[in-house]
Structure formats: C-alpha cells, structure tokens
Image (spheres, rainbow, N blue to C red):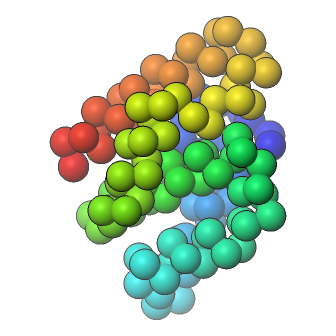
C-alpha cells in the first residue's frame, strides 16, 4: 500500500475507498450500498490485515462527511482506533510517520466518539 501522508485518505487503500464511495453515491446508491460496494471492490486489498482497518476508517470518515455514519461502521472504527490496528504500514516508514499517523487517528477517534 502506498502512503504519502498521515491523513485519513493519504494512502492507496483509503483513496480508492473514497473514489468508489463517491462514484457510487453520484450514481444514486445509498450510503449502505456505497459502503458495500467499497468493501466488495477492495476485498482483495483488504485481505492484508494492515489494510482492512484503513478501509474501515475511511468508510467511517466518508459516512460522517455525508451525515450518515452507520452504527456498525462506527463501532468497527472505534474498535480499530482503540486497539491501535491498521498502523503496520506506517510503522514500516519509521517512528516520525507512525507518531504523525497516531496523532491524526486520535483526533479522528475523538470526532467519532462525539458523533
């Protein structure tokens, strides 16, 4: 998975999820349908244990952006954030990148807890 920053969408998996989600909504899909489409289309990528959490966090952010955060996605995202999952690829980049990602995710966690 390519990474170019610590932001929620600054990696290949989340960027792909965002593109699929937005196209699905533009084509008239519901948020639930768009979410399913993302998970279906990124199934192979999500087999990497370090990537599935990144996709779930992206979905939580995308659903939040359209004010339709689904309870199951919120719960999964909070569990990922609490357990510190999905950091494998940032760990490989070194401590500075890892700490920046952790900071971004902590802010996102606080936002989700208040949503």
Q: Is residue 103 above or below residue 61?
A: above
Answer with the quarter of the image where residue 72 lies.
Answer: bottom left
| Number of numbered tags placed on the structure image | 0
Query: Which of the pair 108/26 is nearer the observer?
Result: 108
* Farthest-out residue, top: 95
Could you tell me which quadrant the N terminus lies in? top right
Answer with the quarter of the image where residue 109 lies.
Answer: top left
Relative to 29, 19 lies left or right:
right
User: Residue 81, position in %: x, y?
Assistant: 45, 35
User: Residue 25, position in %: x, y?
Assistant: 48, 80
Query: Which of the pair 84/93 is nearer the observer?
Result: 84
Q: Residue at x 70, y 40 (%)?
A: 50
Q: Residue at x 51, y 72 (%)?
A: 35
Q: Is residue 95 above or below residue 7?
A: above
* Farthest-out residue, bottom: 28
- Observer able to see residue 26: no
Q: Residue at x 71, y 45 (%)?
A: 49
User: Residue 69, position in %: x, y?
Assistant: 32, 62
User: Residue 38, position in %: x, y?
Assistant: 61, 70
- Observer able to see residue 73: yes
Q: Residue at x 69, y 52 (%)?
A: 13
């Amino acid at each position: 998975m390519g990474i170019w920053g610590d932001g929620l969408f600054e990696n290949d998996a989340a960027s792909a999820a965002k593109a699929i989600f937005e196209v699905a909504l533009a084509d008239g899909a519901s948020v639930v349908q768009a979410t399913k489409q993302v998970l279906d289309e990124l199934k192979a990528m999500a087999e990497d244990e370090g990537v599935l959490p990144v996709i779930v966090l992206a979905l939580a952010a995308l659903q939040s952006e359209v004010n339709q955060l689904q309870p199951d996605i919120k719960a999964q995202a909070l569990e990922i954030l609490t357990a510190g999952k999905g950091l494998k690829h940032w760990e490989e980049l070194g401590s500075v990148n890892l700490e920046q990602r952790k900071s971004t995710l902590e802010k996102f966690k606080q936002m989700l807890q208040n949503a």
